[in-house]
Image: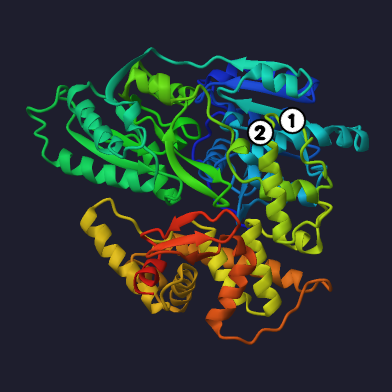
């Protein structure tokens, strides 16, 4: 992985800690509890300071002398931004005492003591170091989000703790789990009835209103975007000063809402239309995971005097980041969520109602610094009938193939009886085992094969890793690595919220597909990658062709790192070598089929296709796919 050290030193000599945060009063109790117990649960509202301050308390108390203090986050954006913040507070360069690691980006050094990382990175670290000997303390933050990797780490740390204690009695591993809403007693029982320290949050009164614009019948409607924009504008016009936080589902919806809001805000006469005459303008800012870091930083900057800031965000603003000055929350009531469809064999991103606990989290953002208001665009009936009490953990609704293979590679063979905090359905585990067997990652007895050990070397899904390995065995990895890299970064095609611009972008993307040979999305990605890489001005090429330069830049870096892995694996005497001298497109298709053979479908009637996986499901090609032209003309 590429490593870097980035300067984030502060000019002032501000105190090591922020004494205003609620956690400061509990510093002594937290350090003592962590010293006296192998496991500790810390409950604290979002904004209490636990993410940034507790690792610093542990560092100053000497916890970093016998290994790193590792702090996990479920989100990439939060991992980087929190590490930057802590580096600033500790007056050090990012990558020195404080660093971070996310997939394909390692900003640490030999001097790093406090290491923020995604939970997926820590899970992969266990493959090389099952006992986590480089760490003295592991802090699992944002546990209430119940990401798949965090849930697996719960069981691993519980299971491996006894082994670590036996092997290294002098320096037993410390495990701290931090959560905002998760049931503390459930966690405490799971970790041997360990102690729980609760940090009361400092929350001002919040008035909550159901606006009845969305009801149970609208559960599958997309009208929530325009209705959310309408309420946002009304809030700006009719409420006293204070910034607004709007919760939407994803980048496309946020950009569409930003454009709608901007158009409507242009017509405001601030001499007559606003309730609070001190409000003289509206600063509209989007926030989502794939935004460039420098753009994300704008949401933390106080607006100019007289200007109201309005942040339109995904669920990232509910827990992962704290934005000062928010007085009003507009809750759409929806979130994008990955759900595994066993018949399709895919994780599908769906827009679903949020849980009641998530709704409470969202509302709480309005009362951080002063009394606030939360406007829920849905009805109480929607709350009662459509919103579950708690979000369903990832482990119960997403594909388990990758984590099951990880457990198998850690010599945990009985994956059904593994200590899960919430037991996944047995059929989902069996489905994952079936998937791994189909791609030859495990044998008939459930043991990991040589190919399975090669697959786990890649930070990719088993299917994609299998395709890359097939290409490497053919000696044509230069065809697959760019595709794998492009699939590993955020969406490369620029999407606009304005219909005309989106139409123009769509035509441009269609032209790129035709230049790539048509009827193949993978070939289109390969063509874009190669054209960008060959261009003397890649950023300009991306701009002219409606491509995210930042995404392409990341893909170029990812491709280099994947190539390092393939070069290393080729040195292994057991790595398979095959001969195939067919045309370029045929080689690409063969490699892809090696990983995705279960996703093959044949034409049925018209534009309808039928899967060949035994289920015989009828499917349609997505309108954005290059294959639409083939389905129409073929």
Q: Is residue 571 left or right of residue 364?
A: right
- The answer to whether residue 613 is visible is yes
Between disc 1 and disc 2, whose residue precedes?
A: 2
- Is 139 situated left or right of 284 in this image? right
Instruction: Please tell me which residue lies in front, 46 or 226.
Output: 226
Q: Residues within 10 Å of mark 2 (few under 14, many from 20)?
A: many
Q: Position of residue 111 (x, y in %)?
A: 71, 48
Q: Nearer the viewer, residue 116 or 548?
A: 548
Query: How many angstroms separate mark 1 from mark 2 (CA)?
Result: 8 Å
How many C-alpha atoms fall within 10 Å of the one at disc 1: few (<14), some, or many (≥20)?
Answer: many
**Which one is in front, 50 or 252?**
252
Residue 11 drawn above or below residue 476: above
Q: Which label belongs to residue 175? A: 1
According to the picture, the residue beneath numbered tag 2 turns out to be 140
**Residue at x 79% of width, y 51% of height:** 409
Residue drawn at point x = 21 percent, y = 32 percent: 230
Q: Is residue 127 above or below residue 197?
A: below
The percent coordinates of residue 61 (x first, y second) are 73, 27
The answer to whether residue 9 shows anywhere in this view is: no
Q: Are marks 1 and 2 in contact (CB under 8 Å)?
A: yes
Q: Say left or right for 158 vs 384.
A: right
């Amino acid at each position: 992985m590429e490593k870097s050290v980035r300067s984030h030193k502060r000019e002032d000599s501000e105190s090591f800690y922020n004494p205003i945060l609620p956690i400061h009063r509990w510093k002594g109790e937290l350090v003592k509890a962590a010293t006296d117990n192998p496991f500790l649960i810390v409950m604290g509202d979002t904004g209490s300071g636990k993410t940034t301050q507790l690792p610093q308390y542990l560092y100053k108390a000497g916890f970093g002398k016998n290994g790193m203090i590792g702090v996990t986050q479920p989100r990439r954006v939060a991992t980087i931004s929190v590490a930057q913040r802590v580096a600033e507070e500790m007056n050090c360069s990012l990558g020195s005492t404080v660093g971070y690691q996310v997939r394909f980006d390692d900003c640490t050094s030999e001097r790093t003591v406090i290491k923020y990382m995604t939970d997926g990175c820590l899970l992969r670290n266990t493959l090389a170091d099952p006992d986590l000997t480089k760490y003295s303390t592991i802090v699992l933050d944002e546990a209430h989000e119940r990401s798949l990797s965090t849930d697996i780490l719960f069981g691993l740390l519980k299971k491996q703790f006894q082994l670590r204690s036996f092997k290294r009695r002098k320096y037993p591993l410390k495990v701290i789990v931090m959560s905002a809403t998760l049931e503390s007693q459930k966690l405490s029982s799971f970790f041997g009835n360990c102690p729980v320290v609760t940090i009361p949050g400092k929350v001002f009164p919040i008035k909550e209103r159901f606006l009845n614009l969305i009801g149970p019948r609208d559960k599958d409607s997309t009208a929530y975007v325009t209705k959310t924009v309408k309420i946002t504008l009304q809030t700006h016009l009719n409420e006293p000063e204070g910034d607004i936080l709007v919760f939407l589902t994803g980048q496309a919806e946020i950009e569409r809402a930003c454009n709608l809001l901007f158009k409507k805000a242009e017509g405001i006469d601030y001499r007559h239309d606003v309730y609070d005459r001190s409000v003289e303008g509206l600063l509209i800012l989007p926030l989502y995971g794939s935004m460039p870091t420098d753009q994300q930083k704008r949401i933390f900057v106080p607006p100019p005097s007289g200007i109201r800031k309005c942040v339109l965000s995904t669920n990232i603003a509910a827990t992962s980041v704290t934005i000062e000055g928010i007085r009003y929350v507009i809750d759409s009531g929806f979130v994008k969520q990955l759900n595994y469809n066993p018949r399709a064999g895919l994780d599908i991103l769906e827009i679903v109602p949020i849980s009641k606990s998530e709704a409470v989290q969202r509302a709480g953002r309005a009362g951080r610094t002063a009394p606030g208001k939360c406007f829920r665009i849905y009805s109480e009936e929607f709350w009662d009938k459509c919103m579950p009490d708690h979000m369903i953990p990832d482990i119960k609704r997403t594909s388990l193939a990758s984590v099951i293979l990880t457990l198998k590679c850690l010599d945990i063979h009985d994956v059904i009886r593994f200590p899960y905090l919430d037991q996944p359905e047995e059929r989902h585990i069996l489905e994952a085992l079936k998937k791994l067997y189909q791609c030859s990652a495990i044998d008939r007895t459930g043991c990991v094969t040589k190919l399975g050990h090669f697959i786990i070397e890649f930070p990719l899904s088993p299917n994609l890793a299998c395709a890359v390995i097939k290409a490497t065995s053919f000696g044509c990895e230069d065809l697959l690595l760019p595709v794998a890299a492009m699939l590993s970064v955020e969406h490369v095609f620029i999407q606009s919220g304005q219909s005309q611009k989106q139409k123009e972008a769509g035509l441009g993307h269609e032209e790129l597909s035709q230049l790539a040979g048509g009827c193949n999305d993978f070939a289109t990605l390969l063509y874009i990658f190669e054209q960008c890489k060959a261009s003397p001005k890649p950023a300009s090429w991306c701009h002219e062709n409606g491509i995210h330069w930042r995404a392409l830049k990341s893909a170029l870096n990812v491709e280099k790192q994947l190539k390092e892995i393939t070069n290393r694996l080729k040195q292994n005497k057991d790595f398979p070598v095959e001969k195939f001298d067919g045309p370029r497109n045929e080689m690409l298709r063969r490699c892809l089929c090696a990983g995705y053979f279960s996703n093959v479908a044949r034409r049925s009637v018209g534009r309808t296709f039928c899967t060949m996986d035994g289920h015989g499901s009828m499917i349609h090609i997505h309108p954005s796919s290059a294959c639409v032209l083939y389905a129409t003309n073929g």
